[in-house]
């Protein structure tokens, strides 16, 4: 079956369909990771985006149930040079084509992904449409131009959990928080002795929860709009502000609640959580030309002067000059473009990073940040 991808500037890429049939719009972006396509597909931060993989062969090790980062894929479409039809890995339970079909995700292969990536790097990410049903370029350009962009749009509500749950042994367990006794909530965990962590789910990846659980934290996940007052009533030891999709300025309710948590409990923000924390501290955010998406981004830790190779997925950044450095310490900087990658408050127990220390399948240079969060909770400062 034929398929095509059309950008809002009129550029058209023809190819062969795989996965589901149909038509979908989204912001077209590229990811430079060589592996990890299953984690990318199921990362809620990609909601609203059509993802292009720069590595030429995708799908060669199939998919499996253990490497999911959420309950389902969230990308709007998937663009590759070649999709492998025969997966070869002992852990594989399905082929990529069948996985996308089952979850109604449209894929296109046979695209010159190098040319597409160069265009997005040169012109910046742009809206696009991927289709197997309408192959008329003029019609598709018009649809792409009329599709919604990401600026000011709240995508968090499309990916956040509908109900609170506790995370134990790699599984979600729904939990009722309508109680006057928070101890009953925390005592519901198999091990009632670990640090209590509330995760505000803006699109949280499962590997964040896995890292916290591996450090014997009791992990309670709540919806993105869960009030700060209700979180504090639960008396957690710390609060995690998760990753998520889209424009941080589009989720004003989250910024307000984060403001109400500052100074009350130790906070750790990742990706969108970092941006929301920056906004709550009085900073500003802006849209990057083509974003950072891949598993090879070099980040300098300013205190140690060590360089970490990091996994990233974001199209917005906190403006360094917008932060009051008398209150906020800059901790990490991206060595490719000098954008802000981490911050820490000089008085309150909080810190955040723009990249993904929970990176799966890797790299794992930044896993120490979860240990720092545990120390922060245990010390209370």
Image (cartoon, grey):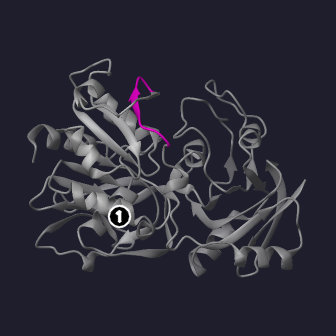
Farthest-out residue, top: 190
Q: Residues within 10 Å of mark 1 (few under 14, many from 20)?
A: many
The residue indicated by pointer 1 is 275
Determine the residue positioned at 88% across, 60% down.
Answer: 133
- Whether the magenta-drawn stretch holds residue 167 is answered as yes
Q: Is residue 299 visible?
A: no
Determine the residue positioned at 68% across, 72% down.
Answer: 147
- Whether the magenta-drawn stretch holds residue 369 is answered as no
What x and y, as percent, mark residue 98? 76, 37
- Name the foreground residue: 116 vs 149: 149
Direction from residue 368 to residue 173 in the image, left or right = right
What x and y, as percent, mark residue 347? 9, 60
Direction from residue 281 to residue 21 in the image, left or right = right
Residue 127 to residue 175: above or below: below
What x and y, as percent, mark residue 217? 27, 31
Q: Is residue 123 visible?
A: yes
Residue 373 to residue 131: above or below: above
Q: Which residues are magenta?
A: 162-170
Direction from residue 14 to residue 371 in the image, left or right = left
Determine the residue positioned at 28% across, 58% down.
Answer: 258
Q: How many marks?
A: 1
- Name the foreground residue: 163 vs 150: 163
């Amino acid at each position: 079956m034929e398929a095509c991808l059309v950008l809002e500037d009129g550029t058209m890429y023809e190819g062969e369909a795989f996965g589901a049939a149909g038509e979908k719009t989204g912001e077209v972006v590229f990811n430079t990771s060589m592996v990890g396509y299953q984690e990318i597909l199921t990362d809620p931060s990609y909601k609203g985006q059509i993802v292009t993989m720069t590595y030429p062969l995708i799908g060669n090790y199939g998919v499996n149930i253990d490497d999911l980062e959420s309950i389902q894929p969230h990308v709007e479409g998937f663009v590759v040079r070649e999709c492998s039809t025969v997966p070869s890995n002992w852990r594989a339970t399905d082929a990529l084509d069948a996985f996308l079909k089952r979850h109604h995700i449209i894929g296109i292969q046979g695209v010159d992904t190098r040319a597409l990536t160069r265009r997005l790097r040169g012109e910046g990410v742009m809206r696009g449409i991927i289709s197997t049903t309408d192959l008329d370029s003029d019609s598709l350009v018009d649809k792409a131009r009329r599709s919604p962009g990401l600026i000011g749009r709240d995508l968090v509500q499309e990916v956040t959990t509908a109900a609170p749950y506790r995370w134990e042994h790699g599984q979600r367990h729904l939990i009722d928080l309508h109680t006057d006794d928070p101890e009953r909530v925390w005592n519901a965990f198999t091990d009632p002795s670990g640090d209590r962590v509330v995760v505000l789910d803006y699109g949280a990846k499962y590997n964040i929860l896995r890292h916290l659980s591996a450090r014997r934290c009791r992990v309670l996940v709540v919806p993105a709009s869960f009030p700060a007052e209700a979180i504090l009533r639960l008396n957690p030891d710390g609060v995690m502000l998760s990753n998520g999709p889209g424009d941080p300025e589009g989720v004003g309710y989250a910024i307000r609640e984060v403001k109400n948590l500052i100074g009350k409990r130790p906070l750790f923000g990742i990706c969108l959580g970092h941006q929301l924390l920056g906004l709550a501290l009085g900073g500003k955010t802006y849209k990057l030309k083509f974003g950072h998406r891949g598993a090879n981004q070099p980040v300098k830790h300013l205190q140690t002067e060590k360089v970490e190779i990091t996994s990233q997925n974001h199209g917005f950044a906190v403006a360094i000059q917008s932060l009051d450095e008398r209150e906020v310490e800059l901790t990490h900087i991206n060595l490719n473009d000098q954008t802000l990658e981490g911050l820490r408050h000089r008085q309150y127990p909080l810190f955040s990073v723009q990249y993904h220390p929970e990176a799966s399948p890797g790299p794992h240079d930044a896993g120490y940040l979860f240990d720092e969060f545990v120390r922060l909770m245990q010390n209370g400062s």
